[in-house]
Image: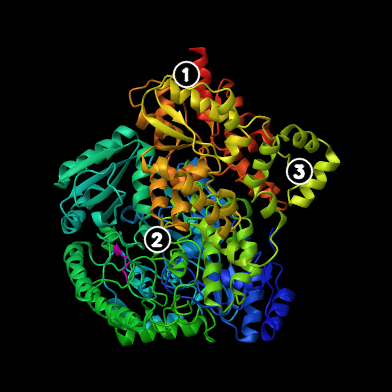
Amino acid sequence: MSKRGSEPGGELQGLGRDLRAAVRGDVDLSVTARALHTMDASNYRRVPAAVVAPRDADDVAAALAVCRERHVPVVARGAGTSIAGQATGAGVVLDFTRHLRRITALDPEARTAVVQPGVVLDDLRAAAAPHGLTFGPDPSTHNRCTLGGMVGNNSCGSHSVAYGTTADNVHELSVIDGRGGTHRLGQDWRGAPEGLRALVESRLELLRTGYPDLPRRISGYALDALLPERGPDLARAFCGSEGTLGVLTEATVRLVDAPRARALAVLGYADESAAAEAAPGLLPYGPLTVEGMAADLVRGAEGLPRGGAWLFVETGGASPAEARARAGDLVRAADALDAVVVDDPARQRALWRVREDASGTATRMPDEADGSPGGEAWPGWEDCAVPPARLAPYLRDFRALLADHGLRGTPYGHFGDGCVHVRVDFDLISRDGVARFRRFSEEVADLVVAHGGSLSGEHGDGQARAELLPKMYGRELVGVFERVKDLWDPAGLLNPGMLVRPAPLDADLRFAPLPREPVDVAFGYPHDGGDFSAAVRRCVGVAKCRTAAPGSPTDVMCPSFRVTGEEEHSTRGRAHLLHEMLAGEVVTDGWRSTEVRDALDLCLSCKGCRSDCPVGVDMATYKAEFLHHHYAGRRRPAAHYSMGWLPRWLRAVAVTRTAPLVNALARVRPLAALGKRLGGIDARRAVPEVAPRTFRRWWRTRHRAGTAAGPRAVLWPDTFTDHLSPEVGEAAVRVMEAAGIAVELPPPGVCCGLTYVSTGQLDRARAVLRGTLERMAPLVDAGVPVVVLEPSCAAALRSDLTELLGDDPRAHRLAAAVRTFAQAVEELAPAWQPPRVDRPVTGQTHCHQHAVLGDAAERRLRAKAGLTGELTGGCCGLAGNFGFERGHHEVSVACAEEQLLPAVREARREGRGEAVVLADGFSCRTQLDQLAGVRGRHLAEVLAEALGKA
């Protein structure tokens, strides 16, 4: 584990001392902890004084007592995915995700569950599933959001047309108020703070007339839940109070029947207005969801029917046939332009992923027509709701208002409930941009109210909308909200600045402390206008990286977080630390920061976030950039020299032909131990043997030019193939020539620079790559494709090359020429039929292949050869130099144990001993060999072996 940053001095030391004396849980005042919790998924930023992870309700009470004594505010926090700013605070942050995450009871007969506030929604759903039950509300963040956060925000999700909001599914709540009093809230007045009933009964007329009637009204306090004619429901009224009235310590929630089968009808309409007009008419058919999105949000319409906008309408049933029949009824009634009904669970998940990723995808506008980067887009008017029948005219007016302000946004969301999500390309950096953000917010609030809507339909008011609540409720009712707040929290310490007596909506913006001019960096960041700050700003905090399991079987992100469970080891956590490094307020050492270095230390540079993060955060690149600056003019870790310079060392071995000697010395334990110690290599790692004969030497001395007179291809002799596994290169030559491809090798001295990039030696990487471009220019200019067998090297040439040498046209030509083995075979020999292997496969898709190159061609080639089955996602954990470096062994092994090694063991248990273990990456093969004693093989090796048997 990395060491967290140092603690501040002065008054905070006294706070820390008192908290540690009172609380059995974790108390952290370090730079790292405070920096990690400055932001949630909103536009806002506050620097906390301390982060406390309580172990139980007594710890919560003790922490609150210390804060009352010291007049320190408190904010309760779950996954930190709130979009209105309510999970940020300047005092003590209570982090419930570390310890308070148990499901303490689940009663299938009563259909209830008792949960602690840090329970992740998907964990509750998994526990309820064996009983045929589920928790109805399901926000798109369902695999990381917590029940405590859902109660605080009164969260809803895509199934709210069937199951309602969290408030509709809560039975009882245990809370601690601002005075330290404990309350058990249910469906009566028991547990109410003194004076609340009298206040409500004195304002009955206002409470009966002051709330709009619509399904997604989340704004303000739900005091109408206390009206006598409804039967006072304190638990319902507390939901959506955003931690301003009390701190939740336990919840008893209701469970509902989970449909045994589901079908998804995707309905295509000419435009957004047509889809919005159609949505209310589908509600009488009892759908589980009615979700809408327009074409300007979709990056490719694969699997979607014709149209410019779509409704995703899910139906349930006791059987697949019943669910599909209901979906068919919907389609016939929908009057859609086109439609498709999907009952295959895998295809449903793929389509739902388009919708669930929208909160991140919508933050990046499409690139402009001239090829320049698209704009950034932000929350701020994220989730208003209007009566469903008013949705179409509201959207038309909203689009017109955007145009009036010269803004762009992409509405989507819960059309069946009239709730719209949208990210808008606000300029939240310049003074004029922030002023326009305020003006637009005020005008759109008027627009929502004019349509009879709620300023918040899902995510709460927080700081983003609370200032505007008088427009919706009037000053008198907002005054009642303030009196309710005072009854629960008279000192105003619980999440101040939120919901009542709010901070201005344009204060505390997260980008205010960032540098106004681009910082000097090595990479080009072409998709961020060359601005490293803009690259870091990509992370909007939706926390898809904070999941205990991959979102889909092919996902990679974020292996280090799934091993450690620590926020600082998530992609979001690292991005927030880099943000704070640039801000310079909490992390004050800039590029020399030890806090950022330590958080990045366990980043495997797997690049999984590049593809799996909805906004394309590329932490591997950011890590390389940071290491480049951090060690500039300083001694580097030994591993940067031993493994970062691996191409240089292996070339020296090849030139001197000393591979047998090197291998012999490596087998002498004392010498090997000394070498690993000096090289920064973990003592438990075996050093791979160097091939006695390199691939290039085989080519020169053994290879006979084939008779293939077909298309030319350059086979790239990467460091790993050339020096450590030449058999892969030899196999690729045999297969490609059998397919009629004329293979040739590039001149000596070419290198992708991967090991220099991954260790942040970017000056050296650029020098190496410039030399490569000089040597490759004639071949690339001739249009010859370049086949790279090692996925990490192919990814480096495809992406890192152009980001480091983007001003050199040759770099772009070489990157465009790069092909994987399967891509080359498919492209250059489309009619060739590979030999039939007819065996199942297991193993793992290389993480860089997944993130940068894609594996569609590999899948097709495997299918042609009769190689059946799927490879796992994730990362093998060795990840080049990472798993060899001292201090990384436990994490490396744990990453392999997440997906790769269990998949191989499962193949053995199921009697699939004939299964081929595929691993195109040298690191993956090495990890399999060292941890499981299994020989993984490149696809080229498998096909070459089959050729020999044909």
Task: Give percent across and percent down for residue 769.
Answer: 51, 51
Q: Which mark is residue 838?
A: 1
Q: Nearer the viewer, mark 3 or mark 2?
A: 2
Q: Nearer the viewer, mark 1 or mark 2?
A: 2
Q: Which mark is residue 684?
A: 3
- Residue at mark 2: 526
The magenta region covers: 420-425
Amino acid residing under circle 2? Pro
What's the coloring here?
rainbow
Tell me: residue 407, above or below residue 13. Answer: above
Secondary structure type for disc 3: loop
Q: In the displayed structure, does residue 134 sit left or right of residue 263?
A: right
Residue 424: say if magenta.
yes
Q: In the displayed structure, does residue 535 sit left or right of residue 417?
A: right
Task: Give percent across and percent down for residue 909.
Answer: 61, 26
- x 66%, y 44%: residue: 893
Confirm or deny contact between disc 1 and disc 2 (CB under 8 A): no
Amino acid residing under circle 1? Asp
Tell me: residue 888, above or below residue 554. Answer: below
Secondary structure type for disc 1: loop
